[in-house]
Amino acid sequence: MSLRVDWKSPHTKRIIVSYLPDWILVILMAGAFYGIDQIPPFHREFSLEDKTIMFPHSPSDSVPMWVVGVICLAAPIVIIAIMSLGFKRSIIDFHSGILGLGLSLSMCLMLTTTIKITVGRPRPDFLDRCQPAEGSVDPPFGLSNYTVCTSPLDTHEMLDGFKSFPSGHSSFSFAGLLYLGLFIAGKMQMFDERGHTYKGFIFAFPFIGALLVAISRTQDYRHHWQDVFIGSLLGSACAWFAYRQYYPSLAHSTPHHPFKSRIHFFKHGTSNERILRYNQEPVYNPGRADSEHGLLGDDPGNAYAMQNTRNYPQQSSQQEPQNQQYPYSREGTVAASSSYDPPSGKI
């Protein structure tokens, strides 16, 4: 498979213009919510007798945020590039993999930041940051607030002390590494009913990495276990959602191929009077001896089932039976209905 792209082709330009807003939105949302993180959080009241916020404060993290960025952003990009460009030699697969990763991380940042500054939960080391005045006690039948602290409220240590829930390290690491695990699992066709145990261990490696980052937050007394648990679930949900935007389920017969509905539309469905959606479920072909499980592979002659084709009001002199499927060839477009005229040029 070639990596060459005809950048001058009008089809290529239309596809690039189609994906450009996606990239702009991912970058803008990531930047916007990184800026929102600078907003002072809600100052939740607390008890001076609460032993869950009496842990000592450490000035450094076991896993700094820049390390999280490397293992959850830079490393997945490199691995995705190696697998998609090096082995599969598919620019479409590389683009889908990287865009999905960006969506997962930006969504995770958006949700985590919003919850952090809204909830304002004190960290386990909050009282060590706060340094309550000597002799301070909780009011009768009430709780204390930040006014009992001798540390200046506008310092980074104090503002960060109210950002315990959820754990950003945990959510970000699961959003990046679990997405990478899903990407690798898809390429391995993990649920191909052959039962290879090595696939399970390979899938588990990114998960273990995310898990270790999350556990380190409790070891540093930066987060309560609930913060880590919810942060991990949040990152996992973002990873799964982003992966399924661009790739089929791992139980699908071709989980190693990204969705190409938009690309097919801009190559073959340029008319504004039609909406074409392609399903990448290969057509069963028992006559192909070289096809695994009787399914078509990824060569240019493959046929794909087409579904959900909807025609807008249009003049047509012929009638086609409903619910009829047509094979699709990547070298050209096969008409999905009598009202569709395939392009004459070679793609």
Image (cartoon, rainbow, N blue to C red):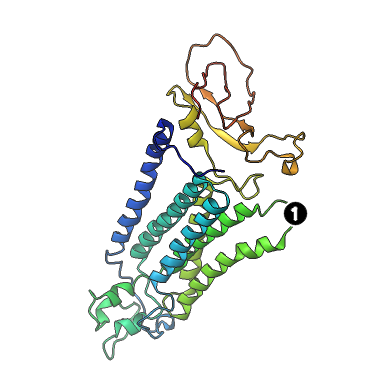
| Residue lying at 74% horizontally and 57% vertically, measured from the top left | 195
Query: Label 1 amino acid?
Result: Arg
Count of labels shown?
1
Q: Nearer the viewer, residue 108 or 159?
A: 108
| Residue lying at 47% horizontally and 51% vertically, measured from the top left | 100
Q: Is residue 161 above or below residue 110?
A: below
| Residue 76 screen position, x and y as percent | 49, 60
Kindly tell me whether residue 38 is visible in this rendering.
yes
| Farthest-out residue, top | 317
Q: Which of 32 and 43 is in front in this view?
A: 32
| Residue 266 screen position, x and y as percent | 45, 31
Circle 1 residues within 10 Å: few <14, some 14–19, many ≥20: few
Instruction: From the viewer's perspective, tell me whether residue 32 is left or right of residue 339.
Output: left
| Residue 96 screen position, x and y as percent | 49, 47
| Farthest-out residue, bottom | 134
**In the structure shown, which secondary structural element does the residue marked by tag 1 occupy?**
loop
Q: In which quarter of the image is residue 33?
A: bottom left
Q: Name the residue under label 1.
A: 194
Q: In which quarter of the image is residue 252?
A: top right
Instruction: From the viewer's perspective, tell me whether residue 69 is left or right of residue 260.
Output: left
Q: In this view, does 238 lie above or below 252?
A: below
| Residue 214 screen position, x and y as percent | 49, 71
